[in-house]
Image: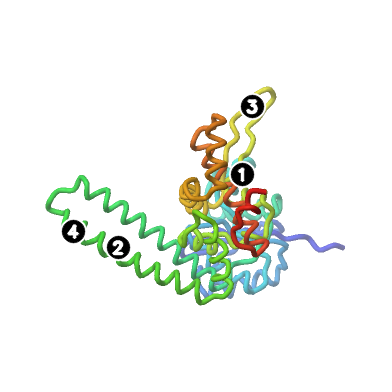
Amino acid sequence: MAREEKFIGIDVSKSRLDVCSTHSEAAWDFENSDLGHRSLIRKLKRLHPVLIVLEASGGYEALVANALYQAKLPVVVVNARRVRYFAKAKGVLAKTDRIDAKVLADFAQAVRPEIRPFPDEEVQKLATLTMRRRQLVSMITSEENRLASASILIQAQIKEHVAWLKQQLKQLDKDLTQTITKSPLFEDHNNLLQSVPGVGKTTSATLLAQLPELGNLSHKKIAALVGVAPFNDDSGTHKGKRRIWGGRSSVRSALYMATLAATRFNPVIQAFFKRLRQAGKPAKVALTACMRKLLIILNAILRDQKPWNLSLSTS
């Protein structure tokens, strides 16, 4: 008799892991710690699951997901929004850690999301640095905005804080550069990406850290993964506007800034943007299309391992 396929869902919180399976009504919980991870791995290896699904939980899932991956278990981290839509479609409106774990197990069985390799230690370090850089830039912007309306009593304090944050940002940029130059693969890819007019060191570092699939997927898949592929909204005779949806917001933000620069300094993107605007496309729609085109160019450059070439990029 064929062995029953088992699908596991793990709901992750800061201190605890709630675990459910499709093959049993039983549920288990473990500490979200190294000791808890080892106990979880022993349990899962006895079950021989087909797929283990966790949802992104503000970073709390990273260590356990990596531990499962290193133990050669079939684990995938999915976007939390996809799971909530799935739960609503099933009529599951209640929300507890155990219910969430069961929904994740059912999601794993019904959807079977694709397993992708987890980033290695160097990629994880680069991802941590790029995330911290976004946080510092956000804090600097917030403080500078507060300064405009702050009373004289606290203006000096805000200026001092901004100066300190900028110093931290300067040091972090040095750490990013060192991390990239110490890795031959990072350095090669970084040079290829920055050969494209409009792509600077911040965009390149973000792509290296947050989009390791770049250069390994088709242009349609990479656009959908980032969230710059338009989806139809049609029903019967109704023809709705096509909209982008989902994807990796941190990558999209970096790509947006690079595209703004590219509309000025990259002849291919500049001409494409002008053509769309002259055709009556709103600026936002034209920029999104340019983001997608720039991403496709970058994907092809890493795929072919060839730097920017104007003649190839216009073909």
Provide the residue designation for mark 2: 165
- What distance separates the C-alpha of mark 3 from that of mark 2? 48 Å
- Image mark for residue 239: 3
Cα gap from disc 3 to disc 4, whole angstroms: 54 Å
| Label 1 or label 2, whichever comes before in sequence order | 2
Looking at the image, residue 31 sits to the left or right of residue 302; the answer is left
Q: Is residue 187 visible?
A: yes
Determine whether the residue tagged by mark 4 lies in a helix, strand or loop: helix
State the residue at coordinates (21%, 58%). 159
SS state under label 1: loop
Marking on residue 229 = 1
Residue at the image position 41 percent from the left and 58 percent from the top: 134
The kind of residue tagged 3 is: Lys
Q: Which mark is residue 157?
A: 4
Residue 1: image x %, image y %? 87, 63
In primary-sequence order, the first of circles 3 and 2 is 2
Q: The residue under label 2 is which amino acid type? A: Leu
Q: Which of the marked residues, 3 or 4, is nearer the chain's N terminus?
A: 4
The answer to whether any part of residue 103 appears in the image is no
Kind of residue indicated by mark 1: Ala
Mark 3 vs mark 1: which is more N-terminal? 1
Name the amino acid type tagged 4.
Answer: Gln
